[in-house]
Amino acid sequence: MKRFFVLSVLIALVVLGYGYWHGATHAAFSISVQVSGSAVGQGFVPGAEIILRDAAGLELARGRTDTHYNFVRLVHPLVGDCFAAEQAAVGSSAGLNAWQRCFEQQARWIPRWADRVHSVSLNTPSCDGPAVPVRVRKYAADWLLWWVPLPHVGGKPYTYYSLSLKVPENRCAGAG
């Protein structure tokens, strides 16, 4: 009985430890850009390049805004932005596997730099903005619940970062 109890506790610690590790080493980063003074959903900046920088002004990561929707696709230095893999995932299992590999690489890359983001530069054909200070919001993973086998609770934990960037309307005339 004692051996069973010790084994059960050990298994529980390993499971929770794995959840904590996964949440600490895998992340997603959501960035939205809006031209201030415009209606929500109307004033996004399609095709802009976003450069995330640390406190010393060094580049940490790049992204580009989607051309149809108000979000930024981060561009991994080796695998890119996963957009082509995401599109291929709809039609085939090989495409789904490619997307999962790309997503995994991006998810492991983000926690390496996301906590150090201090400023962002926005570059478009009509607007080259200087780096502006930003505040990134961080949401810790629910690693204690990752193993629960319920559809609305389970799943591997990730740390989530988000950033909303408002661009002054007069800085990027014609954007939106």
Image (tube, helix red, strand yellow):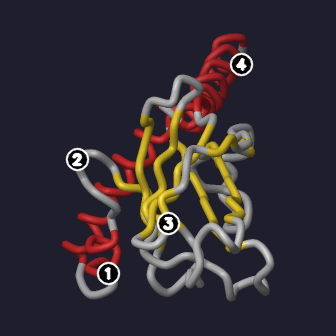
Q: Which residue is mark 1?
A: 87
Q: Amino acid at mark 2?
A: Leu
Q: In the rendered structure, find residue 5 and report the number of the disc placed on it.
A: 4
Quadrant location, the N terminus: top right
- Disc 2 from disc 3: Cα separation: 27 Å
Does the rendering let one see residue 69?
yes
Q: Which residue is mark 3?
A: 127
Q: Residue at x 48, y 56 (%)?
A: 50
- Disc 1 from disc 3: Cα separation: 30 Å
Q: Which residue is mark 2?
A: 78
- Disc 4 from disc 1: Cα separation: 48 Å
Assess disc 2: are there few (<14), some (14-19) or many (≥20) residues with their C-alpha within 10 Å of its C-alpha.
Answer: few
Frontmost of labels 2 and 4 is 2
Determine the image quadrant of residue 44.
bottom right
**First reached walking from the N terminus: tag 2 or tag 4:** 4
Assess disc 1: are there few (<14), some (14-19) or many (≥20) residues with their C-alpha within 10 Å of its C-alpha.
Answer: few
Quadrant location, the C terminus: bottom right
Q: Kindly state the secondary structure of the residue where label 4 is placed.
A: helix
**First reached walking from the N terminus: tag 4 or tag 1:** 4
Q: Residue at x 58, y 72 (%)?
A: 172
**First reached walking from the N terminus: tag 4 or tag 3:** 4
Frontmost of labels 1 and 3 is 3
Counting from the top left corner in percent of width and height, residue 82 is at 33, 64
